[in-house]
Amino acid sequence: MRQSRRDAFSGLLPPAALDWDAAVPDAFEAFVRETVSHGEKAMLVATRAGAVVGVVELVWRPAATADFVAASAAELKAIHVRPADRNEGIGSMLLDESFATLPSDVAGLSLCVLRGNQQARAFYERRGFEQTGTTTTTHAGDDFTEAVYHRPL
């Protein structure tokens, strides 16, 4: 998913925010283990022929969601599809599985996306998300404007 992040954000974020070590750091492995074992978070993975081709991360515990997420909503923290596997419905499948994974008391799904990431914004808008505002995030020490989206469930 490193390549997906680099491909999606190249030209939108500084190189320092995109450069990850080739080896998966222990801290990231611990993060994945904690996420998949937690009752208020989920990480869904799409595979093809034994290789990971897509991943989505969700959280629905209000203390862990961003400020723009209502207490009754979940946050889509990240969704990535390997560049070679894009436009094959994997992102849509991961999003559909995300909706099915959320507890019944979650009333909506919110996310933010870099304002200049038109491809991602179009993906979410085609799937019923509406922009509800903006927020500012920091990547590699620089501030960036992100569009906030929400979709009721």
Image (cartoon, grey):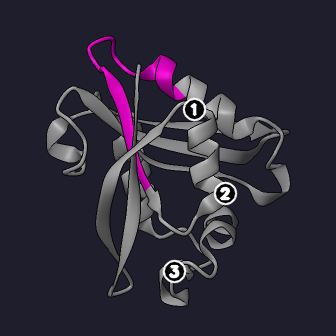
Q: Are marks 1 and 3 in contact (CB under 8 Å)?
A: no
Characterize the local packing of mark 3: few (<14), some (14-19) or many (20 or more) Cα atoms within 10 angstroms: some
Is 19 above or below relative to 1?
below
Report helix, strand or loop for mark 1.
Answer: helix
Specify the amino acid type for callout 2.
Answer: Gln
Report helix, strand or loop for mark 3.
Answer: loop
Is 104 in the magenta? yes
Q: Earlier in the sequence, mark 1 or mark 3?
A: 3
Quarter of the rendering containing residue 110: top left
The N terminus - image quarter: bottom right
Specify the amino acid type for callout 3.
Answer: Leu
Left or right placement of residue 80 versus residue 59 in this view:
right
Q: Earlier in the sequence, mark 1 or mark 2?
A: 1
Instruction: Please report the residue visible at 49 percent of the width from the left and 88 percent of the height from the top.
Output: 16
Mark 2 vs mark 3: give the one in front. 2
Q: What residue span does the magenta drawing correspond to?
A: 98-112
Q: Which residue is mark 1?
A: 95
Instruction: Please report the residue visible at 47 percent of the width from the left and 58 percent of the height from the top.
Output: 113
Q: CA distance from mark 2 to mark 3?
A: 15 Å
Characterize the local packing of mark 2: few (<14), some (14-19) or many (20 or more) Cα atoms within 10 angstroms: few
Specify the amino acid type for callout 1.
Answer: Leu
Mark 1 vs mark 2: give the one in front. 2
Q: Earlier in the sequence, mark 2 or mark 3?
A: 3
Is 107 in the magenta? yes
Q: Which residue is mark 2?
A: 119
Q: Is residue 20 visible?
A: no
